[in-house]
Each structure stands twice: as C-alpha cells, then as structure tokens.
Image (cartoon, rainbow, N blue to C red):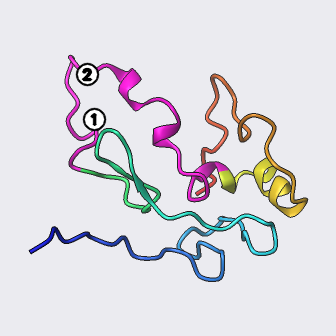
Amino acid sequence: MGKERKRTPKLDIDNTLPHQINAPSFKGTGMTIQPPFKNEQGVIIGDSHYASPNSPLENWSEDTDPAVMSGDQWVHPTNDIGWNTAENQELLEEQRKPQAYPFMHPTIDVSKGQD
C-alpha cells in the first residue's frame, strides 16, 4: 500500500479566518487564503497550532542556534499575525501589494496585543 498523506483541515471560511478575532477578510482583495505548509524543520506553518514536536522552540537547548527560526520558511503568506495590524489590513482593503515586506519594526513587536 502507498503512503497515506495527512490532509490539513481547511481553516478559512469564504476567505476569512474566523478563529482569529482581528484577522482581516481576504474576500475581494485578489488574494486567496493559502494552505498550511511544512517547512525545512518539519514544522507545519499556517495551521494555527503554535506548538510542534519538530519545532526548535519545543526542543530548545543552549546549543540551538536561534537563526534556525529565521527566514520566510517560518512565515505563512496569509495565516500570519502580521495581517492583523492596521497597516497590513489597509493594504488588503486598498488591494495593494506590500512593498518588500509586511509592516515590521526592527526592535519593537508591532503585533503585540493584535491577536
């Protein structure tokens, strides 16, 4: 028998993420909710489950290099807390693509309290 492939359940309803109180609607923006994906570390990104047995956070030690948790492989294109910011919701409402990256600040967590 072939290997069974585990399907991740669909998280959106009509291009919205109703399980996130401040999540924007992607309906009518030209963007569609993307499915979760497995990154290089074997962690499912975008499934709204924030603990994973393969995550470096769950297996942290003094030998863990924090750089393993950086880069695009840790960011989901549509199920990401960054979309809950007013700046990124405005991009959606105006149907504009982000310039380089969604809104971020180098030293301040701009998403704090947005979920």
Q: Nearer the viewer, residue 112 or 26?
A: 26
Q: Is residue 4 above or below residue 89?
A: below
Residue labelled with disc 1: 56
Q: Is residue 21 left or right of residue 61?
A: right
Q: Nearer the viewer, residue 30 or 17?
A: 30
Q: Which residues are magenta?
A: 53-82
- Amino acid on which disc 2 is placed: Thr
- Amino acid on which disc 1 is placed: Pro
Asked whether the beta carbons under mark 1 and mark 2 sit within 8 Å of each other, the answer is yes
Residue furthest right as drawn: 94
Which secondary structure lies at badge 1?
loop
Residue labelled with disc 2: 64
Q: Give percent across and percent down for residue 72.
A: 53, 37
Does residue 76 show up magenta in the picture? yes
Q: Is residue 16 above or below residue 99?
A: below
Which secondary structure lies at badge 2?
loop
Where does the N terminus fall, quadrant-wise?
bottom left
Q: How many marks?
A: 2
| Mark 1 or mark 2: whose residue is earlier in sequence | 1
